[in-house]
Image (spheres, rainbow, N blue to C red):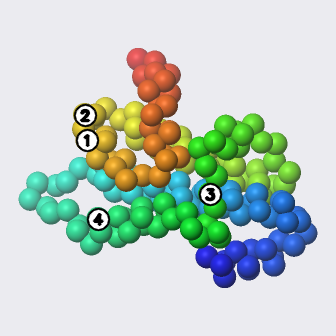
Amino acid sequence: MRAHFEAFIHANREVGAVGADMIWSLICTEVLLRSCRDIVAFRSEPLKPGEPVDQATVENNLKILANLKINWCEFFKPIGEEAWEQLKMLESNSSLEKCLKSQILEREEELVQFSCSEVSAERAEEWFAGMPQLVQKFVKSSGSACEPQLKKGQ
């Protein structure tokens, strides 16, 4: 992570330290949410009769989830739950911030859509098992987010 961070800072010197830290945090958040979305997508795929679960992918997904929860690495700093609402209100200072914010909000929407799927609560819980707190926040608050989707479909 340090090497990626250094390369990013070097390539983005013109945005200043505060701007670069913010953009780096958005990048880390995008990585976190995209990884979680991919894992939920894998977990939600229906198994074909007689086809076993790909155990190597399951194990790799568990490793990814463990890495996403690392908090001792000062170079992996996705935004936390408390900053999530602030992100939604954030006025972008650059096209890069605007693009990253858009991507992050799309990942949130994708995760909410999975949590709104018409499956048993137990099955949905399996999909989101081990997810970081930010993703758990989306799932918990998705009950109200599902209502408009249900109304659209009616």
Question: 10 Å neighbourhood of mark 3: few (<14), some, or many (≥20)?
Answer: many
Q: Earlier in the sequence, mark 3 or mark 2?
A: 3
Question: Where 154 sits versus 89, above or below?
Answer: above
The residue under label 4 is 58
User: Whole-Å distance between the Cαs marked 2 and 1?
Assistant: 5 Å
Q: Residue at x 49, y 31 (%)?
A: 141
The amino acid pointed to by label 3 is: Pro
Q: Earlier in the sequence, mark 3 or mark 4?
A: 4
Q: Disc 3 marks which residue?
A: 78
Q: Position of residue 132 (x, y in %)?
A: 47, 52
The mark closer to the camera, 3 or 4, is: 3
In the picture of the structure, the residue carrying the numbered disc 2 is 120
User: Which part of the image, by quadrant, shows the N terminus?
Assistant: bottom right
The total of numbered circles placed on residues is 4
Residue 123's mark?
1
Q: Image point 35% across, 70% down: which residue? A: 60
Secondary structure category for the residue under label 3: loop
Dividing the picture into quarters, in which one does residue 121 lie?
A: top left
23 vs 49, left or right, is right
Tag 2 and tag 4, C-beta contact below 8 Å = no
Q: Considering the numbered disc 1 on the image, is that residue within a helix, a strand or a loop? A: helix
Distance Cα–Cα, label 3 vs label 4: 24 Å
Q: Is residue 105 above or below residue 151?
A: below
Q: Residue at x 34, y 56 (%)?
A: 42
Relative to the observer, which residue lies in front, 104 or 9? 9
